[in-house]
Amino acid sequence: MISAVSHLIRLSRAGYVFAREGVFGLVDTRPLPMPARTGIALARLIERRSSRNGESRLAAALRRLGPTYVKLGQFLATRPDVVGTVIARDLESLQDKMPAFPQAEAEAVVAEALERPLTSAYASFGPSVAAASIAQVHRAEVDVDGVRKPVAVKILRPGVERRFRVDLDAFYFAARNAEALSPEAQRLRFVEVVNTLDRSVRLEMDFRLEAAALSEMAENTKDDPDFRVPGIDWDRTAREVLTMEWVGGTKLNDRAGLEAKGFDLPALGRIVIQSFLRHALRDGFFHADMHPGNLFVDDDGRLVAVDFGIMGRLGPKERRFLAEILFGFITRDYMRVAQVHFDAGYVPRHHSVEAFAQAIRAIGEPIHNRTAEDISMAKLLTLLFEVTGIFDMRTRPELILLQKTMVVVEGVARTFDPKLDMWKTADPVVREWISRNLGPIGKLEDAVAGAGKLGTFAAQVPSLLLRAGTVLDQIDDITRNGLVLAPETVEAIGKAEARRNRATAWALWVIAALLGAILWMLV
């Protein structure tokens, strides 16, 4: 009961901020029930009069509410299926910038995490150069065989885990109650959305996992001539501290600096697109936050990525799905694109492949009547996912994340070359993957892998038969004697149900009281 009241207080504060910033003006109230429409109308009475356009109101409110809400906004930018395309696009610009915490606190965190004095870990340790909601970065130096080398030290913000935990508990409370009251919330799986955000934030707060992501991508790209990642200093990395090579190149958003150094900007745009597709298709592991601030160009002209807190993974089935879709659109083979959806099990079998191919043709044909610079691969994937919704294709988070990253990298590439032909740029990477994985060599490897799985299954047959016999004996006991719950279990179920009913009743009374108070103040 106490936790429910604290959650309601936190959520009421968030609701007040949303109301003041005009967020409720973005809500289409027509499909809502009368109580909800009335509540939104009352909330809009205290709306701040400003010149902000409608979409930026949400970003402004999230910034006011603090780092957890900023992270929520950044995460929802990857879920247009939940918040809509317009709002998702606006949230992509939400910047995660915070004031730096004191130098003394940063040094104390490093010393405690590395379990040694700061002076023995680093030859020098400078002030913060960038600060965000979860961490901030310092420039430091280390001695390597008598030579000083610059490094970047990423430090977890003190107390951030507790603040995120409290706010996420309130999000869970809101999501559970929304799903209990709204079928639409159940369809959008609000609890699963919060759960995904929770897992993402937990991963971001353990820098050893980010270091592992860096290490994995370094192995994947070691032979790539035009892409690399910073090296990791594992001796100076812990849960709260990440030490890596200092990247001294030019940021990709510094167009003037890139031009001054004589870089071929259209070529850089092609490198961004092809690197992303190569990582997604070849490796099944891609950087999912490739905005210009996270990309550098070193003096050798290679693309260098930083900030590996958000990563995307694609399994073999999803990689084949992506490659075949892109190749199908490139070759205008819409039946192939449709069949891939059915083969992957993404579209239920009761739908017609031919009807689905017809819907896909409606997306693909218009792009072949337009010039290359007018064709957006990211927009095509967005339209594709909208069409698949008509055919009951369930949202797949890994594909949504892929599509959102495609939007970002395509935007970066087109800033360097507005006439960039996305299809010609993607064609060699897609063809290389298809010839390697769907050609004779790929089929032979699939056959070998299948034979290995068959042998593993054959070795497990005796134990599977033994387990099946045990299960049959248990079923026989149940059918004879019935399914009996232990008295302790029955008692625990009764107590849990009683607690839930009491908490729900109290929560409803508190909500009613808060609404009454707001109405009284307005009157």
Image: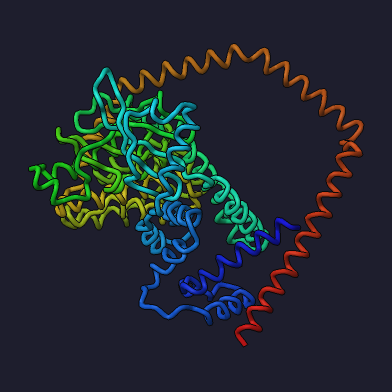
Write down the quadrant of residue 476 in the picture.
top right
Residue at image location 82% in from the left, 26% down from the top: 474
- Which quarter of the image is occupied by the C terminus? bottom right
38 in relation to 242, above or below? below
Residue at image location 41% in from the left, 31% down from the top: 118
Write down the quadrant of residue 285 in the picture.
top left
Image coords of residue 205 (percent x, y): 49, 40
434 in relation to 252, above or below? above
Residue at image location 86% in from the left, 49% down from the top: 494
Write down the quadrant of residue 371 in the picture.
bottom left
Residue 506 is at least partly visible in this image? yes
Image coords of residue 14 (percent x, y): 55, 65
Residue 230 is at least partly visible in this image? no
Foreground: 471 or 158? 158
Image coords of residue 59 (percent x, y): 42, 63
For residue 185, side relative to residue 416 (left or right):
right
For residue 222, side relative to residue 388 (left or right):
left
Furthest residue toward bottom? 523
- Which quarter of the image is occupied by the N terminus? bottom right
23 in relation to 67, above or below? below
For residue 426, side relative to residue 194 (left or right):
left
Foreground: 429 or 293? 293
Q: How is the image coloured?
A: rainbow
Image coords of residue 238 (percent x, y): 46, 30
